[in-house]
Amino acid sequence: MKFVLEVDMGDDAFDGKAVQELERILRYWGGNLRHYELTHGVGAAIYDSNYHEVGRWIITGSDETDTPRP
């Protein structure tokens, strides 16, 4: 299995505060993972500090095109 965390940085990522936003995202999801069963297919959307969806994380097998379960 693989843990995949993907964040769309875009051209104007986070209004010039990409480092701060990525730090926040990694802290939040690092601390939040204990609430999930880490099995194939489990995942969730990732939001920035303005609550805009900017990515996702997922537990995958060898095929990284899997989509998170609701």
Image: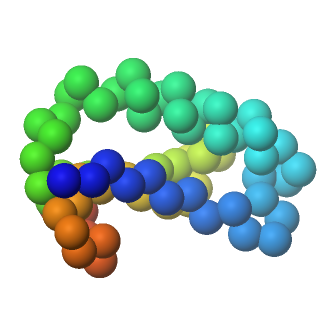
Q: Residue at x 23, y 74 (%)?
A: 63
Residue 46 visible (yes or no):
yes
Side of 47 where 37 appears, left or right: left
Give percent across and percent down for residue 51: 56, 48
Looking at the rendering, in which quadrant would you find the C terminus? bottom left
Give percent across and percent down for residue 26: 53, 34
Who is closer to the viewer here, 27 or 61?
61
Q: Residue at x 30, y 71 (%)?
A: 64
Side of 40 where 22 appears, left or right: right
Q: Is residue 68 above or below residue 2?
A: below
Q: Is residue 40 above or below residue 17?
A: below
Residue 70 visible (yes or no):
no
Residue lying farthest to the right in this orientation: 16
User: Residue 34 sits in which quadrant?
Assistant: top left
User: Residue 25 sits in which quadrant?
Assistant: top right
Tell me how the rendering is colored: rainbow
Q: Is residue 52 above or below residue 10?
A: above
Side of 70 where 13 appears, left or right: right
Q: What number of labels is visible?
A: 0
Q: Residue at x 83, y 64 (%)?
A: 12
Q: Residue at x 29, y 31 (%)?
A: 33
Give percent across and percent down for residue 24: 61, 31
Give percent across and percent down for residue 46: 46, 50
